Image (cartoon, rainbow, N blue to C red):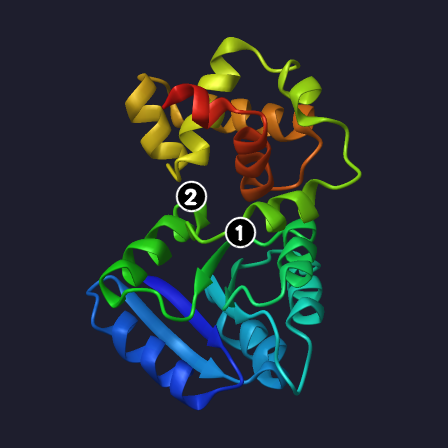
């Protein structure tokens, strides 16, 4: 059972996500709360995944994200957004958000996205704009140079990671052990100088690996 905490300032959004996710047999929304309650509820309930509104009037979603990431065993955190403010999205990427879900995500896809997050996969809405990617990567070493640090196997794994596959799925696809894939992913993050899978996926996109693959 995947335990999920929904954090949003709008009761309608919280209730909607709760009903949709609880209808999936393998997902349980353990609480749906406002921003001010988020940290206390994470400490009390220890959810696997937190769906966190990126902008809330009572407390900044980025502040909550920063505090969650500082926990000894932080949950996986994905941001809920309407993508109306690119600078917030870029900041969340730098702080280690595991993905982004639009608040109007198709209910049929929502449970799948949560499962992907829980399995250490990458969830990025196709509506993530080039402006968001540019904002995240601004000021970084050109990603083409960083990509050159990767071995052929690491590039192969990076492409699958960017497609949203979990370590287990990558292992099955490439006939590798899960531990071997974990080691490769760790090496990829180090060589690309990023802190998470989402950042690595965006670097792959900007470097043209996904375009070349297509």
Q: Is residue 121 above or below residue 47?
A: above
Q: Is residue 110 left or right of residue 122?
A: left
Q: Is residue 42 above or below residue 135?
A: below
For image coordinates 70% across by 18% down, the residue present is 145
Residue 134: x %, y % from top left: 66, 43
Residue 189: x %, y % from top left: 62, 31
Q: Which mark is residue 121?
A: 2
Q: Which residue is mark 1?
A: 98
Q: Is residue 51 visible to the viewer in this orientation of the structure?
A: yes
Locate the N terminus and report the quarter of the image it occupies.
bottom left
Give SS at disc 2: loop
Locate the C terminus and report the quarter of the image it occupies.
top left
Residue lying at the far right in this picture: please name it: 139
Residue 149: x %, y % from top left: 66, 14
Q: Is residue 104 above or below residue 163?
A: below
For image coordinates 46% across by 21% down, the residue present is 180
Give SS at disc 1: loop
Residue lying at the far top in this picture: please name it: 152
Residue 51: x %, y % from top left: 48, 67
Tag 1: Cα neighbours inside 10 Å, few (<14), some, or many (≥20)?
Answer: many
Residue nearest the observer in this picture, 63 or 82 = 82
Q: Is residue 24 above or below residue 74?
A: below
């Amino acid at each position: 059972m995947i335990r999920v905490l929904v954090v949003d300032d709008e009761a309608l959004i919280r209730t909607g996500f709760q009903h949709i996710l609880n209808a999936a047999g393998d997902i349980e929304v353990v609480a749906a709360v406002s921003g001010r309650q988020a940290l206390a509820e994470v400490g009390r309930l220890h959810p696997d995944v937190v769906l966190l509104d990126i902008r809330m009037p009572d407390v900044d979603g980025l502040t909550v994200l920063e505090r969650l990431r500082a926990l000894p065993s932080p949950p996986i955190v994905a941001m809920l957004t309407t993508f109306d403010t690119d600078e917030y999205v870029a900041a969340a990427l730098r702080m280690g958000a595991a993905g982004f879900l639009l608040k109007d995500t198709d209910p049929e896809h929502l449970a799948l996205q949560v499962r992907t997050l829980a399995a250490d996969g990458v969830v990025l809405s196709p509506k993530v704009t080039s402006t968001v990617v540019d904002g995240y990567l601004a000021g970084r070493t050109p990603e083409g140079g960083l990509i050159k640090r990767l071995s052929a196997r690491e590039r192969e794994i990076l492409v699958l990671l960017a497609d949203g596959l979990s370590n287990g799925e990558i292992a099955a696809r490439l006939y590798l052990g899960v531990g071997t894939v974990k080691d490769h992913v760790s090496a990829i993050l180090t060589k690309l100088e990023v802190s998470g899978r989402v950042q690595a996926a965006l670097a792959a996109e900007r470097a043209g690996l996904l375009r070349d693959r297509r």
